[in-house]
């Protein structure tokens, strides 16, 4: 008989974090249905499936079922649940650019909040009450104390994107209070960077990258002239912003560990868990590490602070170790080497 605990629905599986997680799920022998609306992914040439999924299938030597589906369309979600039976949903599908969320907030609330509500309603209808949610360290707002631990206050987010992540966590908490059968793990990511070591899959930002590592990567291959360093007057050792960078494969394995935790321990209720390395690196330290990994000079200019940025953020990741038996194993040199490898092999991303 088929082992139904192996069937996983991954929403947003064609994105950066989604695609690496799908690979790790296949490697751990899970069967994966990916849904994605391709708002941030390219179809493979002459193919229905996105290019990143085709590459994941090749790396894993296994197939996934791909369905072009938008989570804001409840009917199409319903059709999928009618056809497939899942053990758990890993929910990545969302819009994620902080700056953009300030210019088109309604779209962010529609996809991230209303889309998630659709998903939860359909799950409830089919009596599937297990979900791993893609949350963010952004829910902590401006940290009062570091490192950040899960019981610290959340909210006070400075932009609509962050607010959507916070709101969905609140919705999930209320849902768990109302119905004790739900099992919700909300993984709060710190700063995911890097790529699979093969250089076959990686981060492929739309347009000008918002985030530090993909921007540095584009400077390294000459696509951008220099990096703007946003502020050198923060209260940090060298004055530039400090973040907890985590290798994308460590992040992906955190999802597999969360799934195994659900399978083996059947935890009920809402549980937030930080996924970070626990180490903080400044912008200048990341530039140095990237120069070392790539043997390329990264020209940069110090400019004004970016509005909404905080000085420092890093995690206490001990709860993930305790509950999930997970720790980040890759360091900043691995993150830079793998980003460089991906960028060199795919200067134009998947296109
Ligand atoms: N930075 C630069 N120049 C750039 C881009 C970034 O100096 O071109 C600096 C930022 O000021 C910050 C650091 O590099 O100090 C990291 O910035 P990122 O944009 O890479 O990451 P953030 O920490 O600002 O944002 C990330 C995610 C968000 C999430 C947030 C909080 O991208 O989705 O962490 O969890 F909301």
Image: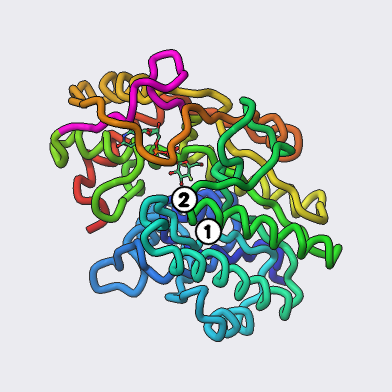
Residue 3, image x, y percentages: 71, 66
Using residue 28 as the reference point, say whether residue 258 is left or right of it.
right
Name the residue that disc number 1 marks: 92
- In the depicted view, which residue is nearer to us: 228 or 288? 228
Q: Quadrant of ligand 1?
A: top left
Quarter of the picture containing the N terminus is: bottom right
At 61% from the left and 41% from the top, the residue drawn is 140
Kindly check if marks 2 and 1 are in contact, taking CB atoms under 8 A apart as contact. Answer: yes
Quarter of the picture containing the C terminus is: bottom left
Using residue 113 as the reference point, say whether residue 332 is left or right of it.
left
Using residue 336 as the reference point, say whether residue 152 is left or right of it.
right
Name the residue that disc number 2 marks: 17
Residue range highlighted in magenta = 226-242
Determine if the magenta segment contains residue 307. Answer: no
Q: Earlier in the sequence, mark 2 or mark 1?
A: 2
Residue 179, image x, y percentages: 84, 67
Q: Which mark is residue 212?
A: none
Q: Is residue 305 above or below residue 31?
A: above
- Main SS type for the magenta part? loop
* Label 1 CB sits under 8 Å from any ligand 1 atom: no
Q: Is residue 296 above or below residue 177?
A: above
Spatial distance from mark 2 to mark 1, Cα to Cα? 8 Å
Q: Secondary structure at mark 1?
A: loop
Estimate how packed mark 1 is, as few (under 14), some (14 to 19) or many (20 or more) residues with alpha carbons within 10 Å.
Answer: many
Q: Is residue 337 above or below residue 31?
A: above
């Amino acid at each position: 008989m088929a082992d139904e605990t192996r069937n996983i629905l991954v929403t947003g599986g064609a994105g950066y974090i989604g695609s690496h997680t799908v690979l790790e799920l296949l490697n751990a022998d899970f069967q994966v249905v990916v849904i994605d609306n391709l708002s941030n992914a390219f179809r493979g040439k002459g193919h229905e499936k996105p290019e990143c999924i085709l590459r994941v299938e090749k790396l894993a030597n296994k197939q996934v079922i791909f369905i072009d589906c938008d989570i804001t369309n409840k009917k199409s979600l319903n059709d999928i649940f009618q056809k497939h039976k899942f053990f758990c949903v890993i929910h990545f599908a969302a819009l994620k650019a902080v700056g953009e969320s300030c210019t088109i907030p309604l779209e962010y609330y529609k996809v991230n909040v209303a889309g998630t509500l659709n998903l939860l309603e359909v799950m409830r209808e089919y009596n599937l009450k297990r979900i791993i949610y893609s949350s963010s360290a952004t829910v902590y707002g401006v940290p009062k104390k570091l490192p950040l631990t899960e019981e610290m206050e959340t909210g006070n987010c400075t932009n609509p994107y962050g607010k959507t992540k916070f709101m969905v966590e609140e919705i999930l908490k209320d849902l768990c209070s109302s119905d004790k059968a739900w099992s919700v793990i909300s993984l709060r990511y710190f700063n995911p960077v890097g790529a699979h070591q093969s250089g076959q899959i990686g981060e492929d930002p739309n347009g000008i990258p918002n985030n530090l590592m993909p921007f540095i990567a584009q400077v390294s291959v000459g696509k951008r002239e220099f990096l703007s360093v946003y502020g050198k007057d923060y209260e940090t050792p060298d004055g530039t912003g400090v973040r907890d960078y985590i290798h994308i494969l460590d992040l992906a394995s955190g999802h597999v560990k969360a799934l195994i935790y659900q399978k083996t321990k059947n935890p009920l209720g809402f549980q937030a868990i930080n996924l970070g390395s626990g180490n903080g690196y400044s912008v200048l330290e990341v530039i140095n590490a990237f120069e070392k990994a790539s043997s390329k000079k990264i020209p940069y200019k110090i400019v004004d602070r970016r509005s909404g940025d905080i000085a420092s953020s890093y995690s206490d990741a001990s709860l993930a170790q305790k509950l999930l038996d997970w720790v980040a194993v890759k360091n900043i040199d691995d993150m830079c080497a793998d980003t460089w490898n991906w960028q060199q092999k795919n200067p134009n991303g998947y296109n």
